[in-house]
Structure formats: C-alpha cells, structure tokens
Image: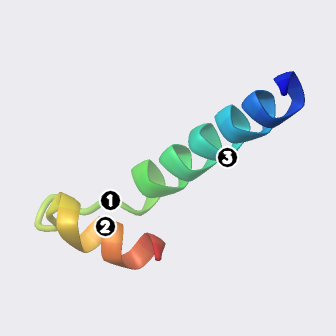
Amino acid sequence: MAKYKLLLMLLLVSSSLFVAGCIDEDLSAEQIAEKMQ
C-alpha cells in the first residue's frame, strides 16, 4: 500500500511541475485540466 501512495505522490508532483512549466496567464484551470487528459 505504501508503494502505491508513494507512486501517486510522485505522479502528482511531476504533473503539477509540468503544469507549472506550461502555464500561461491567460489559461484557466479548466483548460489546463483538458490539456492534462
């Protein structure tokens, strides 16, 4: 169970860093969510 929690945290951190790197001021959170899918 701990392995899955660690993997999930790693995925969340890496995806949030990716979003932060791709973010533009004119993008809304909904548009970012669409890009992530």
9 or 3, which is in the foreground? Answer: 3
**From this viewpoint, which residue is outermost toward the top?**
2
Q: Amino acid at mark 3?
A: Leu
Check the image and report above or below for 14 versus 10: below
Check the image and report above or below for 14 versus 4: below
Q: Residue at x 81, y 36 (%)?
A: 4
Q: Classify residue 29 by image quadrant.
A: bottom left
Q: Residue at x 66, y 33 (%)?
A: 9
Q: Residue at x 53, y 45 (%)?
A: 17
Q: Which residue is mark 2?
A: 32
Image marks 1 and 2: residues in contact by CB distance under 8 Å = yes
- Horizontal side of 33 relative to 36 (left or right) equals left
Q: Position of residue 34 (x, y in %)?
A: 33, 77
Q: Amino acid at mark 1?
A: Ile
- Horizontal side of 25 relative to 36 (left or right) equals left
Q: CA distance from mark 1 to mark 3?
A: 18 Å
- Horizontal side of 31 relative to 1 (left or right) equals left
Q: Which residue is mark 1?
A: 23
Mark sitting earlier along the chain (1/3): 3
Which element is circle 1 on? loop
- Horizontal side of 16 relative to 25 (left or right) equals right
29 or 24, which is in the foreground? Answer: 29
Q: CA distance from mark 2 to mark 3?
A: 16 Å
Q: CA distance from mark 1 to mark 2?
A: 8 Å
Q: Classify residue 33 by image quadrant.
A: bottom left
> Quick one: label 2, few (<14), some, or many (20+) residues within 10 Å?
some
Q: Which residue is mark 3?
A: 11
Q: Position of residue 25 (x, y in %)?
A: 15, 58
Q: Classify residue 23 by image quadrant.
A: bottom left
Q: Residue at x 31, y 67 (%)?
A: 32
Mark sitting earlier along the chain (1/2): 1
